Image (cartoon, rainbow, N blue to C red):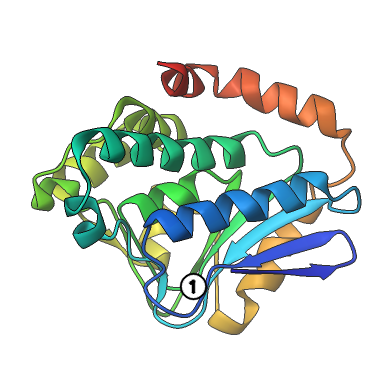
Amino acid sequence: MEIEATDGRRVLRLGDGLNVFDADFVEALHDALDGVVADPGATSFVTVASGKHYSNGFDLTFLGSLEMDALQAFMHRTSAALGRILVLPMPTVAAINGHAFGIGALLALAHDQRVQNEQRGWFCLPEIDLGMRFNPFQLGLVTGKLSRPTAAEAVLSGRRYGGPSSLAAGIVDAVAAPEDLVTTASALAEARVGKERSIVATLKGDLYATMLGHLER
């Protein structure tokens, strides 16, 4: 992962591969968040990747290699990273350049706003087809960020949403051509820039208190 700085904007580039969630990916995400929070010049935060994928979800082979205690610790560490994005003290926007599956889709939902590639890539929660359950924090993120009908459809059907259908369903706030994703995401963030950091974090914590409460259990 790399962070690009332009004025106050910080763009976290996730990578050009599948960007699956394993131990290295999650720790790199935490490290990036540490850097942005500690950076007094950072006024907005955008995540994006390159290639076909924003994030293809969990590395299922990696998950299968973990004993139960290690698996639980990893899942908590993963949820904690998304929880940090939820309350980041600045505007956050996910620029969904390609496929966002499973936990990759939840990563996008953890941001304040989302913009999706209008030409390619799916937003999808495929857990129903994988025989997997959401933990309480993950499900809270889905139901807290999506309307009830959209959350039910996404969870119970495993539907794949392209950019236009995501926009119609209220999953994303805008769509854009691939070359315009970061610019569009930055414009969305810019409309909320300039608020004092501590109150931004406090109000986000208030908004998402129920789902964040699941992280403490």
**Residue 133 falls left or right of residue 199:** left
Q: How many labels, in total?
A: 1
Q: Is residue 38 above or below residue 54?
A: above
Which residue sits at x=38%, y=78%? 120
Amino acid marked by disc 1: Asn
Mark 1 burial class by Cα count in 10 Å: few <14, some 14-19, many 20+: many
Could one spot residue 173 in this view of the protein? no
Which residue sits at x=71%, y=55%? 45
Near-viewer residue (174 or 30): 30
From the top left corner, tell me how far across and down residue 75 is, in percent: 35, 39
In the rendered view of the protein, which quadrant contains the N terminus?
A: bottom right
From the top left corner, tell me how far across and down residue 18 is, in percent: 37, 73
From the top left corner, tell me how far across and down residue 39 is, in percent: 85, 50
Near-viewer residue (162 or 39): 39
Which residue sits at x=77%, y=53%? 44
Based on the displayed image, in which of its 4 quarters is residue 167 positioned? bottom left
Near-viewer residue (168 or 54): 54
Could one spot residue 55 in this view of the protein? yes
Which residue sits at x=63%, y=23%? 205
Q: Is residue 203 above or below residue 29?
A: above
Based on the displayed image, in which of its 4 quarters is residue 94 positioned? bottom right
From the top left corner, tell me how far across and down residue 119 is, in percent: 42, 80
**Residue 62 falls left or right of residue 184:** left
Residue denoted by label 1: 97
In the rendered view of the protein, which quadrant contains the C terminus?
A: top left
**Residue 193 falls left or right of residue 155:** right
Q: Secondary structure at mark 1?
A: loop
